[in-house]
Image (tube, grey):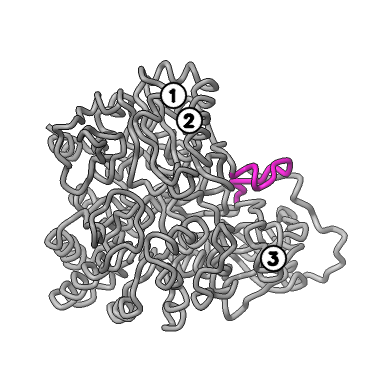
Amino acid sequence: MRIVHRIMTLTSFALSAGAVSAQDIADSIYMGGPILTINDEQPNAEAVAVKDGRVLAVGSLADLMEHQGDSTEVFDLEGRTMLPGFVDSHGHVVFGGLQALSANLLAPPDGEVTDIASLQQTLRDWVDENSEVVEKAGVIIGFGYDNAQLAEVRHPTREDLDAVSEDLPIIIVHQSGHIGVANSKALEIVGFDASSPDPAGGVIQRASDGSPNGVLEEYAFFGALVPILAQLGPEAFAEFAVAGAELWASFGYTTGQDGRSSGEAVETLKAMAKEGRIPIDVVAFPDVLEAQDYIGANVSQDYEDGIRVGGCKLTIDGSPQGFTALRDRPYYNPVGDYPAGYKGYAAVTMEQVQDAVDWCFENGIQILTHSNGEGASDMLIAAIGAAQEKYGDPGNRPVMVHGQFMREDQVDAYKRLGVFLSVFPMHTFYWGDWHRDHTVGPVNADNISPTGWIVERGMMFGSHHDAPVAFPDSMRILDATVTRRTRSGDILGPQQRVDVMTALKALTIWPAWQHFEEDDKGSIEVGKIADFVLLSDDPTAVDPESLDELQVMVTIKDNEVIYEADDSIKKGEMRSSPFMSDPVTAHRFLHAMYQATGVEKPWLQGLTARFQ
């Protein structure tokens, strides 16, 4: 799609253009606004010329107009700021489709749920608006509630959801993606009752009489999804993939990630891409414990219609705000029924971690590891150290994902081992107050997502959104990385703040390096792919406290416009509710939660067996 009304021919410019060869004639020239190249050798430019989907020249407008020919289109930025397209350091593109296609249970500013009553009403309203869909699907899905933001400061229970419907199964997903709540009908379908044991790696929370209260943690939650959602059909999975990719593009991402993916998820992405329905590049990292053969057969640095398998994903622990991340010390003041000295727990054994890391190092495959708590980082550091002793450095650029609670000595260890840190500074906004008051306490909360420590050591890092944990809102990420302001306005760890340009590199050139794509993406340089994003203003020129007010206006992939903001919709309105694609698919959620993941038959059978 080309935005015709933004293309102009510069016949009014009286520029002397020397004779140039045909191969030097640009397809497009971008001019008319600030251009931040994220190239330290040439940080700013007046214009960019593009030919055959790659950057032909970067520099002054006078020089670049030498590349104008009769067929050259000149794209007037109209004062907006152009940067390289954003590269997703960690997210779940396919699972992100749920965020676009389900009942929105997020708290302000991204939703309207503030207490149990408003959560119930949001679900009722969604059912009323989609009654035909709900009747056909036979299940109600809500996404994004956060007990930390509810007035009651607790999870909803099955009774709370029964008040919405006793006849249809209801599953609502915690914003972390690691916890969910089921109503009585859903628990009946799953077969959870007072006699059901907690599955390995999960917890069924109980009422006083021992019966499930509806709250399911980790693999108890993931397993519950399988029998409820398995009937919904693969067409829905494809729609989730499309919706997720479109959502990423709307926030300026030209390269997305499908973390903890699966073989079926990748094949679905490929099928949709062949149909021209995936507007961005997507790098997938299937679960190494469940799809090792698929990874080994499909890992590649080359895209197929914009999709590739970049390596594998390993998950050691869970959610810090949900108290399921593995710490090296007790949680500060956990909310819930936790024993004294509770530190969280690992979802896998040390043997599984070591075997997965060894396999990746032996085969030269990149591994991304979800490691939130200090205890999980201790496991990962030990495993990578042991693998390097066995196999040396295969150049596979291992990545630690999240690292909410890292000790400073662990940052040193990651540097020594050559581990790239993909961190989550947006946590400071969404859950900073919660971390200060409940998970780690006021002292250690200052050092969650410790970007300051990382920069002090001269390390690169990526800033991610982990969508659908949060919206893939690039400007919210930028703001949080720079300001570290919480929802209440507190500054969480001023010593961990970084400057705007560093934060922009963590959205562009550094995650491009993470994905082995720094020669093609992440900066505006000659020879690189013409992936760009246009912002409403220059992030290096505005008040840092207003960075989250910047808006992605246009996203350009391979020199083609793939997203243009609707000027009639304010950013806050755009974020406030699910808004992408066809709502009919909202209840067709088969496999979308591949943190469960029921997409591959052997895994589905094995997971179901845990509950028999």
Looking at the picture, tell me which residue is in the foreground, 407 or 516: 407
Above/below status of 409 relative to 188:
below
Relative horizontal placement of residue 458, taking residue 401 as reference (left or right): right
The amino acid at mark 1 is: Val
Residue identified by numbered label 3: 538
Residue identified by numbered label 1: 164
The amino acid at mark 3 is: Asp
Comparing labels 3 and 2, the label whose residue is closer to the camera: 2
Q: Which mark is residue 92?
A: none
The residue sitting at 47% across, 40% down in the picture is 99
Which residues, given as a range, are shown in magenta? 560-575
Relative horizontal placement of residue 265, taking residue 443 as reference (left or right): left
Relative horizontal placement of residue 286, taking residue 293 as reference (left or right): right
Q: Which mark is residue 120?
A: 2
Q: Earlier in the sequence, mark 3 or mark 2?
A: 2
The amino acid at mark 2 is: Gln
Secondary element under disc 2, as helix, strand or loop, is helix
